[in-house]
Amino acid sequence: QVQLVQSGGGSVQAGESLRLSCAASGITTTYSCMAWFRQVPGKEREGVAILYASGGRTSYDYHDSVKGRTTISRDNAKDTLYLQMTSLTPEDTAMYFCAAGLVPCGFATFRAISWGQGTQVTVSS
């Protein structure tokens, strides 16, 4: 399986922005379903954003808590998946993971093929 390598993350102040990256060779051609998840110790993992490419069409889905201030995208030239978040709040503090999954591609029934190693995002108020 293709290894997903994450970068980005770190500590930021509330209201600031952050971009996470998830790179893998041939990522745009190998995976049609990709997503970002996050997890806080003691809580269930939750989906943040999903990108699904099929037949030249790309669809997106976002968790309600990040909708409107979050963008999931892919850069074909750089073989990289991105998660751009703005207006960060302490509630966004979590370990973030990128993942590739099987289709159908959705939060509720996500079936991972591969996971990134995770990167910590800490938002202070």
Image (cartoon, helix red, strand yellow):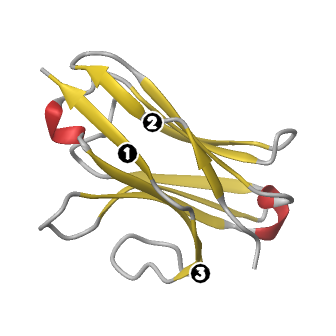
Q: Amino acid at mark 1?
A: Gln
> How many residues crowd mark 1 within 10 Å: few (<14), some (14–19), many (20+)?
some
**Sequence-first disc among 1 and 3:** 3
**Sequence-first disc among 1 and 2:** 2
Residue at (56% x, 62% y) in the render: 116
Q: Amino acid at mark 3?
A: Val
Spot occupied by residue 7 in the image (x, y as percentages of width and height): 58, 42
Residue at (15% x, 40% y) in the render: 91
Q: Which mark is residue 120?
A: 1
The image quadrant that residue 39 belongs to is bottom left
In terms of depth relative to the viewer, which is nearer, 120 or 99?
120
Please say if the residues under marks 1 and 2 sit with CB atoms less than 8 Å apart: yes
**Sequence-first disc among 3 and 2:** 2
> How many residues crowd mark 3 within 10 Å: few (<14), some (14–19), many (20+)?
some
Residue at image mark 2: 9
Please say if the residues under marks 1 and 3 sit with CB atoms less than 8 Å apart: no
Q: Taking 110 as reference, is 94 above or below it?
A: above
Residue at (21% x, 44% y) in the render: 65
The image quadrant that residue 108 belongs to is bottom left
Q: Taking 49 as reference, is 85 above or below it?
A: above
Spot occupied by residue 120 in the image (x, y as percentages of width and height): 37, 45
Callout 1: helix, strand or loop? strand
The image quadrant that residue 32 belongs to is bottom right
Spot occupied by residue 40 in the image (x, y as percentages of width and height): 21, 57
Q: Amino acid at mark 2?
A: Gly
Alpha carbons under labels 1 and 2: distance apart: 6 Å
Spot occupied by residue 94 in the image (x, y as percentages of width and height): 27, 49
Residue at image mark 3: 103
